[in-house]
Image (tube, rainbow, N blue to C red):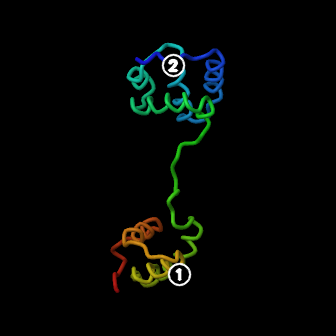
Amino acid sequence: MNTKFKYTELQRREVEEALREAVTVEEYQRVQAVWLRMLFGLGATEISKAIGLHKASIWRIHSRYRSEGAGMFRTAAKGGRRNANMDVFEEKKLMQPFLRKARLERVIEIFEIRQAYEGALGRSVSDSTVYRLLKRHGLNKLLLQRTK
């Protein structure tokens, strides 16, 4: 166990306060990982067994705490649609005519959807992007007809 990092009394109070104020399970586990290290000097292996996170996650939490301080407990985890081409509302608006057509005719052409999507974006996209778009909006590949 690396004991080079010494915790101050102020840090201990901040962590204990964060432990009381934790709202989500994930936030509580992050605080608990630092608290167990701080109070009992446990290593990542013991902490991971105690709170149910992977050892690498514990290392990451400890590293973030050393660099960012107690504020890191309140930051939300990354995730979501950071690399999305459009937001959900724009996608729904774009897909409405195609969804109507799919309900009526039971067949829609991928090429038409791809052209509309690329037109809205102003650039070309891969087939997989269009297929993921269709999956997000509940369309089955069996309903689709691929024509070019």
Alpha carbon of mark 2 to alpha carbon of mark 1: how far? 60 Å
Marks 2, 1: nearer the viewer:
2
Q: Which quarter of the figure has residue 58?
A: top left
Q: Nearer the viewer, residue 131 or 66?
A: 66
Q: Nearer the viewer, residue 146 or 13?
A: 13
Q: Residue at the location (35% across, 72% down)?
A: 141
Looking at the rendered structure, which numbered label has been put on residue 3?
none
User: Identity of the amino acid at label 1?
Assistant: Pro
Q: Can you give x and y, in whole percent of width and height, for residue 61 in the image?
A: 49, 31
Q: Residue at the location (34% across, 86% down)?
A: 148
Label 2 Cα neighbours within 10 Å, binned few <14 / some 14-19 / many ≥20: few
Q: Quadrant of the N terminus?
A: top left
Q: Residue at the location (43% across, 33% down)?
A: 57
Q: Is residue 48 above or below residue 89?
A: above
Q: Is residue 8 above or below residue 60?
A: above
User: Identity of the amino acid at label 2?
Assistant: Phe
Q: Is residue 42 above or below residue 32?
A: above
Circle 2 is placed at which residue position? 5
Name the secondary structure under disc 2.
Answer: loop
Q: Nearer the viewer, residue 100 or 148?
A: 148
Q: Earlier in the sequence, mark 2 or mark 1?
A: 2
Q: Can you give x and y, in whole percent of width and height, for residue 60 in the image?
A: 46, 33
Q: Can you give x and y, in whole percent of width and height, for residue 125 in the image?
A: 42, 73
Q: Can you give x and y, in whole percent of width and height, for residue 106 in the image?
A: 40, 81
Q: Is residue 81 left or right of residue 46?
A: right
Q: Residue at the location (51% across, 19% down)?
A: 5
Most extreme residue toward the front is: 4
Circle 1 is placed at which residue position? 97
Q: Is residue 140 above or below residue 10?
A: below
Q: Nearer the viewer, residue 58 or 51?
A: 58
Circle 2/circle 1 CB separation < 8 Å: no
Label 1 Cα neighbours within 10 Å, binned few <14 / some 14-19 / many ≥20: few
